[in-house]
Image: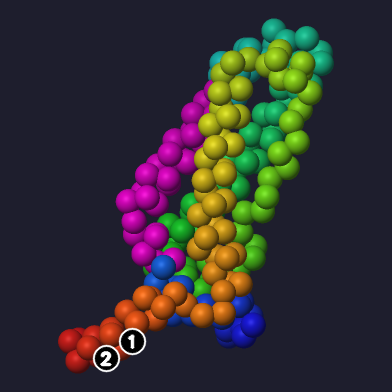
Amino acid sequence: MSMNELGAPATAPWRANVISDFARSELFDRTFLEGMDLVEETAAYLDGGGRQDSKLLSRNAALSYASESMRLTTRLMRVASWLLVQRAVREGDMAPEAACESRYRLDAEDTSVSEAEALHDLPLGLLELLDRSARLYDRVRHLDRRMYVEASVETAPHPVLSQMDRLRDAFGAGAN
């Protein structure tokens, strides 16, 4: 695999276009809004109603609450960071090639389930946020893998994209 001048894996021009196109897409807009709204909703819950709910829990349930709320905030911060990288690409603050660096990737999350009995005692508000954040994380991780991880394994661009690049090179140069 070749490297660019920043020491990051070299990104084929067609892949940089895919990354930039996603950052300008309606899918990105919706995902960004959903992610940031969920971050705000979670912060409001944990600082407000969740704090009150946690005071009513047994010792074991309170420990589970603390653990799961940390898991929740970590998950959301990872998603928010990924979304902010995509927004930086969109706004031209980061090159698509730089967004390909491994430090911006989402890894598989530890999906081990806490003891069912401990989860059973948790407040419904926290359980709902855990579920929604897990589903969002899975969707964003899928996007990340499709755009970055799987693309870095590919040896050649998709034939249609390759032909589109050739047409753009042939006709686009004279149109500018």
Residue 7 lies left or right of residue 87; in this view the side is right
Q: Is 55 part of what is drawn in magenta?
A: no
Tell me which amino acid carries mark 1. Answer: Arg
Residue at 61%, 72% (x, y): give it.
Answer: 153
Q: Which of 38 and 153 is in front in this view?
A: 153
- Residues in magenta? 19-45
Tell me if 159 is positioned left or right of 11 in this view. left
Residue assigned mark 2: 170
Q: Is residue 147 above or below residue 13?
A: above
Do we see residue 80 in this rendering? Answer: no
Question: In the image, residue 142 lies at what x, y percent?
Answer: 54, 52
Residue 152 occupies which quadrant of the picture? bottom right
Q: Which residue is drawn at 47% across and 77% down?
A: 157
Above or below 11: residue 113: above
At x 37%, y 50%, the residue is: 27
Q: How crowded is mark 1: few (under 14 residues within 10 Å), some or many (20 or more)?
A: few
Q: Are circles 1 and 2 on residues that touch, CB within 8 Å?
A: yes
Please provide percent x and percent y for residue 131.
58, 29
- The answer to whether 7 is drawn above or below residue 106 in the figure is below
| Numbered label attached to residue 166 | 1
Residue drawn at x 60%, y 29% is 130
Residue 75 in the image: x percent, y percent?
A: 62, 41
What secondary structure characterizes most of the magenta part?
Answer: helix
Q: In which quarter of the image is the C terminus?
A: bottom left
Q: Is residue 59 visible?
A: yes
Give the quadrant of the N terminus: bottom right
The Cα–Cα distance between marks 1 and 2, rounded to whole angstroms, is 6 Å
Q: Residue furthest front?
A: 159
Three-letter amino acid code at the position of disc 2: Ala
Q: Does the magenta stretch include residue 27?
A: yes
**Is 146 placed left or right of 68 in the picture?**
left
